[in-house]
Image (cartoon, rainbow, N blue to C red):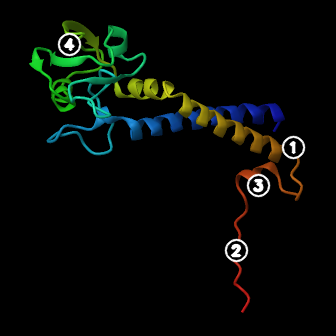
Amino acid sequence: MSGRFLMMLAALLVSLAVLVSVMMLSVRNMPEIAPPIGSARPANTLPDHGFLGIEMGTHGAPPEQVTKIVPGSGADRAGMLAGDLFQSADGKPVANIQDLRKITIDKQPGDTIHVAVKRDHQMVEIDIQLIDYVDLALLRDLALPEEREAARKRADKFLHELNTEEAAPSDGATPSDAVNPPPTTPTEPAP
């Protein structure tokens, strides 16, 4: 195989590794995905309901306070701000994230939810288009520069190792041996 083909293949593999890494980080870091108690969602499936793209009541804030807006999410595009205090969603009172989940669990990505928040002692009404889980996960991780940098470093290290192995296998091994090393048999310790 030509070196150019191998480099293109390596770049494709690195891109795939970065995407998988982003998705895995998303699953671990999303406080908004926990199903409400009594939810019938089967285990090990992605949620199929819509998401606003916010965090509420974290870091010691009151439970109804929006503490984080995911850049590019429906909440961000609609103008919701960190610090807004939830009052209602679709006419139902919201005092915490669990109340909000009970309302959004039956909504689909693309649906619009009407929310009322208190901002600077004034009521503000906002219509927010919900997004799906995968979009939310990607937006969250793209907003985390330290995660992007870590993924970039892993990709650079992988490419460096690939280039080093391809350049000169000094022990007579072929490049395919580096990817799939021959099995080794364990040796017994000397008595």
Instruction: Say which residue label 3 marks.
Output: 177
Q: CA distance from mark 3 to mark 2?
A: 16 Å
**Quarter of the figure with the C terminus:** bottom right
Mark 4 in CB contact with mark 2 (< 8 angstroms):
no
First in residue order: circle 1 vs circle 3: 1
Q: CA distance from mark 1 to mark 2?
A: 28 Å
Task: Return the x and y of residue 97 as percentages of the image width and height.
Answer: 22, 30
Which amino acid does the dot numbered 1 rest on? Ala
Q: Secondary structure at mark 3?
A: helix
Which amino acid does the dot numbered 3 rest on? Asp
Task: Return the x and y of residue 33 as percentages of the image width and height.
Answer: 30, 34
**Residue at (60, 36) in percent of width and height:** 150
Which amino acid does the dot numbered 2 rest on? Thr
Q: Nearer the viewer, mark 1 or mark 2?
A: 1
First in residue order: circle 4 vs circle 1: 4
First in residue order: circle 1 vs circle 2: 1
Task: Return the x and y of residue 174 as percentages of the image width and height.
Answer: 82, 52
Instruction: Say which residue label 1 marks.
Output: 167
Task: Return the x and y of residue 96 as percentages of the image width and height.
Answer: 18, 29
Instruction: Say which residue label 2 marks.
Output: 185
Mark 4 in CB contact with mark 1 (< 8 angstroms):
no
Instruction: Say which residue label 4 marks.
Output: 118
Q: Is residue 174 left or right of residue 84?
A: right
Q: CA distance from mark 4 to mark 2?
A: 68 Å
Q: Quadrant of residue 184?
A: bottom right
Q: Secondary structure at mark 4?
A: strand
Q: State whether residue 177 is above or below residue 183.
A: above
